[in-house]
Amino acid sequence: MPVFYTGICAGASQIPLMAKLILKEFTSCPLSRKRSGMGIIMKYRTDRNGNRISQLGYGCMRFSRKGSSIDYEKAEREVLLAIEKGVNYFDTAYVYPGSEECLGRILDQNHCRDKVYIATKLPQYIIRSAAAVDKTFREELTRLRTDHIDYYLMHMFTDHAEWERLKSFGIEEWIRQRKEEGSIRSIGFSYHGDTEMFLKILNAYDWDFCQIQYNYLDEHTQAGKRGLQAAAQKGIPVIIMEPLRGGKLVNLPDKAKEALALDSHGYTPAELGLRWLWNQPEVTCVLSGMNSTEMVEENIRIASEAGPGCLTAEDMEIVEQIKKIIREREKVGCTGCRYCMPCPKGVDIPGNFYYYNLMYMEKKSSARFEFAQNMGMRKEPGFASQCVQCGKCEQHCPQHIPIREKLKEADRELRPLPYKAGINAARKFILK
Ligand code: SF4
Ligand code: SF4
């Protein structure tokens, strides 16, 4: 059964033939139309089971934190605003600290469980038995205060062997039973390997949906456009994660900002990145890790306007220019996903890479200053020099970054001798 796109856009004549074949109808939730602001009407795309999924989904990995826990009141405001405006797909995972509990509590206390779809994930990489699968799943139901998961994913496949391992202790029968009892409605997987392996996993089971990292920088990496289109051809809905590559497509280098400023539509970097995705009818839902009400409002506005054909040739040309500029400058392709964390020695791996890249996206001196101020003055600074080369982190990095080698580079550049001495002196003074 095909994945139906249920949106409409002025530029639909530019949509390729296959896309037109799966372009079905425009629908919008009557509830969201009634409640949402002027002209803001959420668009929905229908999955193979007939569920209407908002084309903007809520990524619950990046809820704001207060100290070591999630800022519940803030997350609640943001989630409820999103629901009110028609967002109905919420993505979390067993391993996102506090996220399942927070989402479950928000939905339960505000009586809106039945208004949304919950997507959560089995941490398959730590599962070693059928009993562990069931125990983890039951724990997730408890955390989420629900009796069913609408979209359940095998978390972070990178290799077909992982699926084979799960099969060896009866995961297929377990899924069949959960579907029969209604505690799992749709089954899928999230993916971070290469395209060939994605296709192999895609064809290895009758999946209801899948989730891939996809954005204009990753058009030809990971599952990539080939993977996206192959899934759509099979009628498998595709949920998009890392749509703005962990903020990299928001905080563009100055030269890229200048290129974007020439675009006659006046898009912000985030809007261009999101439109690039919704321009493709094979995309079912784009997850955004929203952690401010402004971000929720802005993403909903963009989602209400964007759809296949919404980017012009001029916009596409600007995207190509920006890609070229970013690629020239980036030192490490880190998305900030934090799958490599925690490091047993306390190294803040994504933090080091963020500031290392920032040195090449912006001015070296200001990036070093920010690094010194934000990371260098923490009680536990997480410097790359704390690394003991154990290699644990590299086993979990979906981008396959040679983390140990890149950390050495980052440390050399972020903390050359005079900076290191300065940071140490400042630490003694400030943290005494
Ligand atoms: S290799 Fe280094 S950064 Fe990675 S987990 Fe080990 S100590 Fe931490
Ligand atoms: S190094 Fe890899 S795993 Fe760690 S945050 Fe970056 S992309 Fe994610």
Image (cartoon, rainbow, N blue to C red):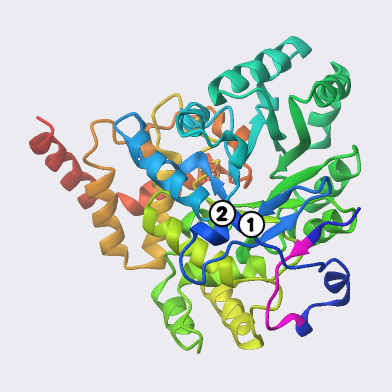
- Tell me the kind of residue under disc 2: Gly
For the residue pair 33 and 311, the one nearer the viewer reads as 33
Position of residue 155 measured from the top left corner of the image (x, y, whole percent): 68, 34
Is 178 situated left or right of 432 in this image? Answer: right
Q: Residue at x 52, y 48 (%)?
A: 83
Mark 2, Cα crowd under 10 Å, few <14 / some 14-19 / many 20+, is many
For the residue pair 62 and 28, the one nearer the viewer reads as 28
Q: Residue at x 24, y 36 (%)?
A: 378
What residue span does the magenta drawing correspond to?
A: 5-12
Residue 89, visible in the rendered structure: yes
The quarter holding residue 364 reads bottom left
The quarter holding residue 162 reads top right
Which is in the foreground here, disc 2 or disc 1?
A: 1
Is 392 situated left or right of 255 in this image? Answer: right
Residue 327, visible in the rendered structure: no
Is tag 2's residue or tag 1's residue first in the polypeptide sequence?
1
Q: Residue at x 18, y 39 (%)?
A: 424
Position of residue 372 measured from the top left corner of the image (x, y, whole percent): 24, 48
Q: Which mark is drawn over residue 29?
A: 1
Q: Residue at x 57, y 75 (%)?
A: 324
Q: Which mark is drawn over residue 86?
A: 2
Mark 2 touches mark 1? (CB < 8 Å): yes
Q: Secondary structure at mark 2?
A: loop
Mark 1, Cα crowd under 10 Å, few <14 / some 14-19 / many 20+, is some
The quarter holding residue 313 reads bottom right
Q: Which mark is drawn over residue 145?
A: none
For the residue pair 361 and 80, the one nearer the viewer reads as 80
- Asked if residue 410 is among those painted magenta in the image, a careful observer would answer no
Q: Secondary structure at mark 1?
A: loop
For the residue pair 88 and 218, the one nearer the viewer reads as 88
Q: Main secondary structure of the magenta part?
A: loop
Query: For disc 2, does the CB lie below 8 Å from ligand 2?
Result: no
